[in-house]
Image (cartoon, rainbow, N blue to C red):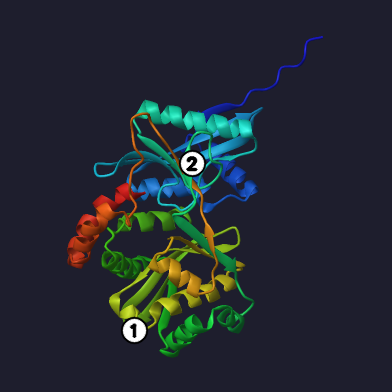
Amino acid sequence: MNAPLRAATTIRALDFNDAQDVRRIEGFVADAGASLFHRPAWLTGVASGSRQRQFGLLAERLGAVTGWLPLTEVRSRLFGKALVSSGFGVGGGILATSEAAERQLAEAAQAHARNAGFASIELRGGTVPAGWVSWSDKHCGFARMLASDDEAELLAIPRKARAEVRKGLGFGHRVTVGRSAQDLAAHYACYSASVRNLGTPVFPKALFRAMIDAFPDHSDILTVWQDDRPLASVLSFYHGGAVMPFWGGGVFAARGARANEVMYFELMRHARARGMIRFDFGRSKTGSGPFAFKKNWGFAPEPLTYCAWSAPGSRPRNIDPTDEGYSRKIALWKKLPLPVANTLGPWIARGLA
């Protein structure tokens, strides 16, 4: 008697216009407890807001989804072409139910990169495919459980940082939470000033609008005000029981007013009211100012493992702002008038996905 043939795994590109296909992937991601950055909605929002095309590879066996690799096709005149999983995210990578599916998805991604002229592939998490270069010393993630109430939350913050939070709360700043055009304008005013002061090009305002639209029930903007002036603002996502403050910043006056401290504490309070149980402070560059800020709030750094593949004869793109080659450019960018930085920044930042 002949042995029964084993069903083969097939790999194909996801059709983002096929609502049923997209729902299947959303379900697969949810069942796996995977990251926000694995969701097709994330890729679609990024594509709409940055004009970098979404792409995804789907593994199937006997009609069931067995693997998924979300990708953003990044094209930049300054930084070259790369497939990134996932664009503008801090997570992503291969999600699969078997080693065979993982291997086939990696091979299919390499084939797509070669055929479409992408010099490299970057995976921000997940399995490291055989032969790829990986590293765990550049970024750390910060997350912890939320406390049961406001006082317990304050006590969870180390003494020096807690004193700064109490000082900020004593100013009586007005705090708003919303998703309107006014909320977005306040957020962009704070965020663009913050990244300019750090020497970084600002992302397009359209990206933030698109991401809010992509997650209508799972995103909002919290802003701290001094009278009618926004001091600090953060765009957050809610996923898997966690609040994720993702894009946040403050104007120069925010420091003296302790507006950033108030912003994150108020976000913790707001997240508990929404039923969240974890605060995911996101990633920070190892040894950076934000890295120290999060540690001072009592968050323990967890190294993040990323990996990359490069086509023969090519190098991975370099978008590391701490690289010595960028130091002079960063110093010059900090001196730009904000309107100039906000005009030039989005064109450059689209390539930093």
Amino acid on which disc 2 is placed:
Pro
Residue plotted at (38% across, 26% down): 115
Kind of element beneath mark 2: strand
Q: Where is residue 46 in the image (x, y as percent from the top left)?
A: 39, 49
Q: Mark 1 points at which residue?
A: 256
How many other residues sit within 10 Å of disc 2, few (<14), some (14-19) or many (≥20)? Answer: many
Q: Where is residue 295 in the image (x, y as percent from the top left)?
A: 49, 70
Tell me the mark number nearer the camera, choosing from 2 and 1: 1
Label 1 near label 2: C-beta < 8 Å?
Answer: no
Cα distance between the residues tagged 2 and 1: 41 Å
Labels 2 and 1: the sequence-earlier one: 2
Q: In which quarter of the view is residue 151 placed?
A: bottom right
Residue type indicated by callout 1: Gly
**Residue drawn 53% across the image and 32% down it:** 105
Secondary structure category for the residue under label 1 = loop
Dot 2 corresponds to which residue? 70
For residue 86, above or below residue 148: above
Q: Which residue lies furthest to the bottom in this view?
A: 170
Counting from the top left corner in percent of width and height, residue 7 is at 67, 22
